[in-house]
Image (spheres, grey):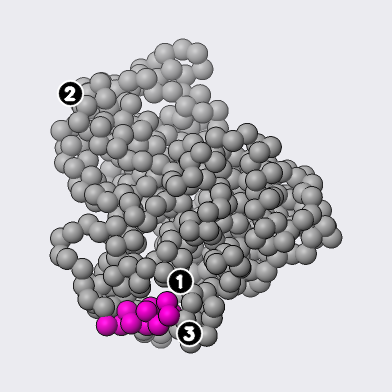
Amino acid sequence: MTVAVIGGGISGLVLAHRLRSQGTKAVVLESAARVGGNVQSPAHEGYVLESGPNSFLDREPATRELAAALGVEARIRPADAAAKNRYIYTRGAMRKLPSSPPAFLTSDILPFSARLRVLAELFSGRGPAGVDESLAQLGRRHLGPEATTVLLDAVQTGIYAGDPEKLSAEATFPQLVKFEREHRSLILGAIRSQRAARKASAADADGGSKSKLTGLLSTFDGGLGVLVDALAAALGDAVHTDAKVEGLTPQASGWKVRVREHGRTVELLASQVVLAVPSHVAAGLLRPLDEPLAAKLEGIPYAPIAVVHLGFAPGATPKPDGFGFLVPAVEGKAVLGTIHVSTTFPFRAPGGRVLLTCLMGGARRPDVVARDEDALVALAREELKAMTGLTATPELTRVVRWPRGIPQYTVGHLERLASLDAGLKRWPGLHLTGNAYRGVGVNDCIRDATRLGDTLA
C-alpha cells in the first residue's frame, strides 16, 4: 500500500521523493494550492525574494545528494565574498563581528571588561549534570552576562528569533553543550573541534576524497524555490494540492485517511502515515485519537515573524557591506536583523539594485507581526534609518507574515520529543517529521526527512 505524507513543505516533499526513489509508493497531501510551505522564492520586478528561509550552509551531505538526484546541483550558488563581514547593532552603533580571537580582543563588539570576562571562559566549569538549562543560563556561566545579552542573543535571534531565557541550550545549540561536557570550556572545545576538522579534511584530501561540500553559505540561482520546484516536478501526480486531510482512522493493516480534495471527500488507504505539518496542525489531526499526544504537540510554541523586503533602484543607495546585521533584544528594536541580499547573492537583485530583507517580531515582540503591511514597511524604514542612516525610498516593498513562523525549542524540548516518540508507539505506522522537532533549518529538515524515508523504505 501507499505511504501517505500529509504536508507538502520541504520535509514532506523530500520524504516522498526519498521513498519513491527506493521503490516505495508515496503520495503527498497538501491543503494549500501550492507546495513548499514557507520555502517560496517569488520573482518581482527583477528581484528574487524569499518568503521564508534565505539560504543553507553547504555542509549537509543529504542536501547535496538531493540536489544531485534532482539535477539541480549545478544551480547551487555560494554567497559572494563581499558577504564575509557580519555586524551586530549594539550600544547604539553598528559593530563588526570579529572573525578570530585576536580580532575579538581588539574589537569594540563588547566593552573591554566584558571581553576580559569572555577570555575567563577558559577557566569556567561544567554545569549541573542532567539539567536542561536555558541558553541564557549556559551563556552567563561561560561568557558572562554582557556577552550573553549581546552576542549569544544575536546569534540565536538569527536562527530562532526566540528568547534565550526560555530556549533549551541542548536542543538549540547542542554543540555548545557537547563542548562543555567533553572539554569543560566552550572555547577549548571549539579550538579542539576545529583542529580535528582540519585533520579530517587533510586526511580526506590525502585519501583522494572528492566531497563537493564547501561549507559555504549557499542558495540556488533562482532561490530556494528551485529545490521545491524540482521536487514537485520529480514527484509529478504523486503530489495532491488543495487536499485537506480531515481525519485519520487506524485500520488492521494501516490507516484510512479522509481527504477533502477539490470539493469532494475521498478516502485513501495507507500502510504508513507521516505528519509533515506544523506541530499544531498535527495536534488537530491526532486529538480525536490521542488527546495526551495532541497536547504535547500543541505545547511546542512558535515565534511569529514578519519578512519585509525593501528593493532600491540602481544608484538610489550604496550597496551595504557584508551579509547583514543582527539586533539583540536589549536594543529595543522591532527589526531582529537585516540581510543584505544584493551583497550576499547579487544575482537576486541584478543590474545594480539593492535588496534588503528585514526580519521583524519574534518571540519577544509578537505584537509587531499583527501590524498592517504599510505600518511594517514604515517601521522597518524608520529603524533602518536610525541604525544605518538609510534614507532612500524603495521602489519595491513586499511583506510576508508568518503568525507561527519558527518553532521554539524551549527548556524541556528533548524530554517532549522522547515523550512524543513513546506516544507514537501506541499508533503503529504513524510518524512525525518537520522543523518542529529536530532542527529548524533547511538542512535539518532534509536530513530528518531523508532518515525517516530510509527507515520506512
Q: Amino acid at mark 2?
A: Ala
Give residue 10's position: percent from left, percent from top. Answer: 46, 44
Callout 1: helix, strand or loop? loop
Gap between marks 3 and 1 measured at Cα: 35 Å
Majority secondary structure of the magenta segment? helix
Q: Residue at 20% of width from left, 31% of height from top?
A: 292
Q: Residue at 22% of width from left, 76% of height from top?
A: 125
Mark 1 neighbour density, 10 Å: few (under 14) some (14–19) many (20 or more): few
Please report whichever mark, 3 or 2, sits nearer to the chain's N-terminal start.
Answer: 3
Q: Amino acid at mark 3?
A: Leu
Numbered mark located on residue 252 in the image:
2
Q: Which residue is mark 1?
A: 211
Give residue 172's position: percent from left, percent from top. Answer: 34, 57
Q: Which residue is mark 3?
A: 105
Mark 2 neighbour density, 10 Å: few (under 14) some (14–19) many (20 or more): few
Residue stretch rendered in magenta on the structure: 113-123
Q: Nearer the viewer, residue 321 or 380?
A: 380
| Residue 276 in sight from this viewpoint | no
Tell me if residue 52 comes above or below residue 191 in the rendering. above
Gap between marks 3 and 2 measured at Cα: 65 Å
